[in-house]
Amino acid sequence: MAEIDPIVLAAAIIYFAAVFIIGAYSRKFMKSPTDYAVAGRSVGSFVNGAALASTYFSPASFLGLPGFIFVLGGAWAGALIAIAMGGTLALVTAIPLRKYAPVSFTDYYADRYESQKLMRILAGIPTVYGGTLYIILSVFGAALFLVALLKIPYPAAVVLAVAVIMFYLWVGGMVATSWNAAMQCIVMTVAAVAAAVGIVAYFGGLPQLTQATLSLSPVWFNYPPQPTMHKFVGWWFAVWGWFWVWHFGQAGMPYSVVRFFTAMDMKSARRSIIWYTAWGCILYLTLTIIGMGANALITQNHPLMPVVIEKLPAKFHNALGVMILTQKTYGLGSVFDYSLIAAVEALRNPALLGLLVAGGLAIAMATAAGWAMVLNVLISRDWMGIVAGIKRAKEKPILWARIWTTIFLLIALIWLLFLPPKLTVVATDLSGGAFVAILASLFPSLILGLYWKRATKMAAVLTSIIMFTLAVVMWLWGYFIGSPHLWPLDPTYAIPHQFYVILLSFPVFIIISLLTKPCKEETIKKYCEDLHKL
């Protein structure tokens, strides 16, 4: 191992120790399959809200957003804050779903649309597709922090990340996941706040930070900062489109929805969303400040700048050059994955670097664990137990959930260690496309099923099949013509992750519902009307 600062190493050791202690301690609270799957519905609002925040904000938020902010301008920063405040939209699903109190993400689809097998399969396919990719992305994010800040060899970093996540999922299930995720939320937020405060202090205050930003990018507060950008990217349309889908995600993504099931009651579920929104606003506000000052800070004070000036052309004698050189050094991920790391390194403060490594590990592991819990319950309970009727899965649900946890984490390990490094970047891009595919396939069935009596089984079935296929095909089409963010029919238009597919899914669902037979009256009453009575 290359030489690292003892303070940074100590921070990582303390973080891992906390994860192990929480995981081991939570084991005594796991006495039934319900405890393993939904923490016995005993998680308080503060812990639940913090856990939702750390699970929902993937490592992509921590790794790359500061870089995108300083390159693409202040409009992105505004979009970030709007996303965090948009967390309150999750109230439309959190309260009725907590009243319904299912165990698995697919339960509502099966009950509301009167299909215990088919709807579990159709709701599960995009969930497994997206969840697997997010686990890969999250393990990679944890490994990247271990490599870049602790100088651990990449293979060892991947194995360590997988082993730690697997440990607390095995011993504590959703109880350990909830408590660890809450702890991880606090750690990652403290890390971001400390970095933002450090950057403001470096420049001598917010006015000086603003002036330093404008000195390098005079149109930073305008949009677009570059006149050569694709059509639509020069509009607010693209900025909001890029992140707008996250508003839906907070209310309908599987790992968000399952978090509603763990709340103690409806009041706790409601308060969880308020806490989640508060954590999100703090995190994104601080990431905005970091992104705003990162370019000037890295250019002025990063220890690699002399090497950058020596090895790279003059146009890269700036923050981007540092990130390019760092990416070449480690050969992992994309250039923007190193933006936050480079910004904090430029502050030359070991304590802040220590917080950063703990925060980076926290956000990555929380997301991976949250998705693993969704998938292990889906496969072991829903597909094996209910759909296939496998007796062993019904008799030993916790064992089989643990087995599937191991399988999904091993898939991530194999992908990251044995497939070409370029596929890691592909997995990162695919996870964004999978986000859209999940919401386009399943969110209309969830939200309209809860609030519209006319929602039908045929609409749920066909929307899932049609929109999942369309989302994947259009994303791949855009990817192969140059970028997943290009409109396949005209590459001069930028359409982030083909997000329009989500908008299209709602009229598709509504039209099919109006043309097909509604569900039984008792089903509508129980799984739609009654869930709104507080």
Image (spheres, rainbow, N blue to C red):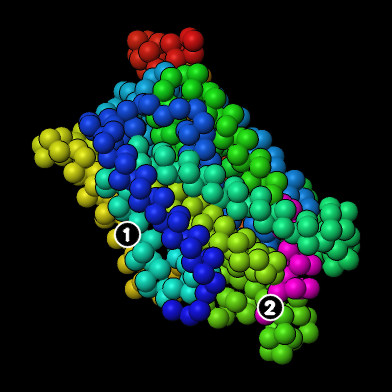
Above/below status of 517 relative to 376:
above
Q: Is residue 407 left or right of residue 444?
A: left
Work out whether 490 lies above or below 37: below
User: Dot 2, how many residues are within 10 Å of its Cα: few (below 14), some (14-19), or many (20+)?
Assistant: some
Task: Look at the numbered disc 1 and give the secondary structure of its residue.
Answer: helix
Magenta residues, start to end: 287-304
For residue 7, side relative to residue 409 (left or right):
right
Q: In the rendered image, is residue 25 in sight?
A: yes
Q: Which residue is mark 2?
A: 303
Name the spot of residue 77 as percent of width and height, x first. 73, 50
Q: Residues within 10 Å of mark 1 (few under 14, many from 20)?
A: some
Disc 1 residue type (three-letter)? Ala
Q: Secondary structure at mark 2?
A: loop
Q: Nearer the viewer, residue 287 or 244?
A: 287
Asked if the residue under mark 2 is in contact with the one under mark 1, i.e. CB atoms within 8 Å, the reply is: no
**In the drawing, what numbered circle is on residue 163?**
1
* In front of the other: 380 or 309: 309
Judge depth for marks 1 and 2 and give the one in front. 2
